[in-house]
Image: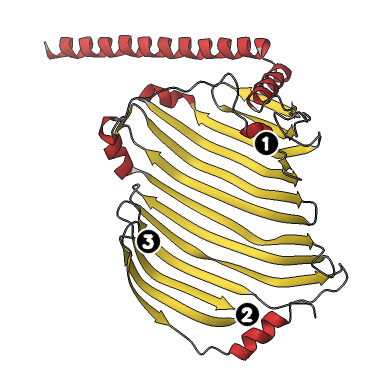
Amino acid sequence: MSSTKTEKKQSLFRRLLKVFLLAAAIFVLLSIAALIVLRIQYPPEKVKQLIESELSSSLNNRSVTIENANLNILKGFGFDNLIVYNHPDTSSKTNTPADSSKFIFIKKIFLNYDLLSLLRRNVKIRTIEIDHPVIYYTSHHDKTNIDDMLEPSTEDTIEVVADTSEADVSLPISFELDKFEFKHFDAYLTITTDTSSLYAEISDFSIYMTDLELPRGEWMDVRDSLWAKAKIESPESAWKIRLENPALSHPYQITSLFDLDIDLLVDGIRSVNAAGNAGMRDVMITENISKRIPASELFRLQFDLNLDTQQGDVDISELKLDLADENLFVVKGSGKNLYEQPYLDVRVENSEIRLSKIFSNVKSIVPS
């Protein structure tokens, strides 16, 4: 009798295994067929044109070009050398300069996801990468190259949404993001008026995020369970500012090496820990674009603090400021109820401050 039961169980197991293997084979064949159909209907060139068209429509019909575009329905998509051009319209409606030059350039955009995670009611993004984005901002006599994007569309409608408390909001699926990279960001800003002009360059600014998790469920639970790590950095990047004004005897240009390194840890929406430092060194002020005067490190700010975003409380493990290689102060302590009636309980520690050295170092970067 026992052997008969064993044989029945084995037979049942074999049938279930055959059904599972057949279902898996059908799924694979359907996936392959779907990919073939998508490849035929949406070849890379057509995907590129669709993306260009959609982006152009969403950016007030600005010209958009993409060099390469790739789409894999099971894994993700990416494209290279995205360029958004300035709007050429000079009508009073947009008030934008007549300029068809670049507005935004992005060397690479890549998104990789796990499509099968949807079967587990989970959206899993493995990687979002935005590599070397560049923005060119211009303002000329009260006209900027973003005015047309700020104008509301005539087709826009205002939708009245019922007031919903946090307790009524829920997330039907969980969300995971393994890695987000926004790296090597550059910005070029040009501002001119009737009497003066300002030009600035900011280079090599990056934001990284890992291990972002949003569980499904009521918003109160999601908020308390949110987890993410982030890093903001700008390692030894060159910054430049050029200023021309009739009040100045000569045009002045300021160049420096700026570095920034901040680590963030978000543990629930309530708690944010931030630690890092920022500094500026090798400052050079150029008079008439010919005289260069190097200086030592102008400032260095170091900090380690934890913020309770709900209550507005902050714990300061360390807040240290150096000016011209001299330590000004070190602050430790805490703050309570910063949003309404702030209460600070801090201790200020000073090293020996040599004002003569600070003045001497700061004076050395200013042209005489």
Q: Amino acid at mark 3?
A: Asn
Label 2: state its secondary structure: loop
Which residue is nearer to you in this view: 211 or 21?
211
Q: How many marks?
A: 3
Give above or below for 244 relative to 29: below
Relative side of 350 to 96, left or right: left
- Which mark sits nearer the N-terminus, 1 or 2? 1
| Mark nearer the N terminus (1 vs 3) | 1
**Residue at 50% over, 14% down:** 28
Three-letter code, disc 2:
Ala
Q: Residue at x 46, y 85 (%)?
A: 350
Q: Residues within 10 Å of mark 2 (few under 14, many from 20)?
A: many
Q: Residue 293 occupies which quadrant of the picture?
A: bottom right
Residue 282 occupies quadrant: bottom right
143 shown above or below 94 = below
Query: Which image quarter holds the N terminus?
Result: top left
- Report x, y in % for residue 24: 43, 14
Which residue position holds label 2?
324
Element under disc 3: strand
Amino acid type for the residue under numbered disc 1: Asp
Q: Position of residue 19 (x, y in %)?
A: 36, 9
Q: Which residue is mark 3?
A: 306
* Position in image of residue 280 (x %, y %): 64, 69
Q: Give the alpha-carbon distance from disc 1 to disc 2, as whole Å.
A: 41 Å
Quadrant of the snapshot with the C terminus: bottom right
Residue linked to disc 1: 147
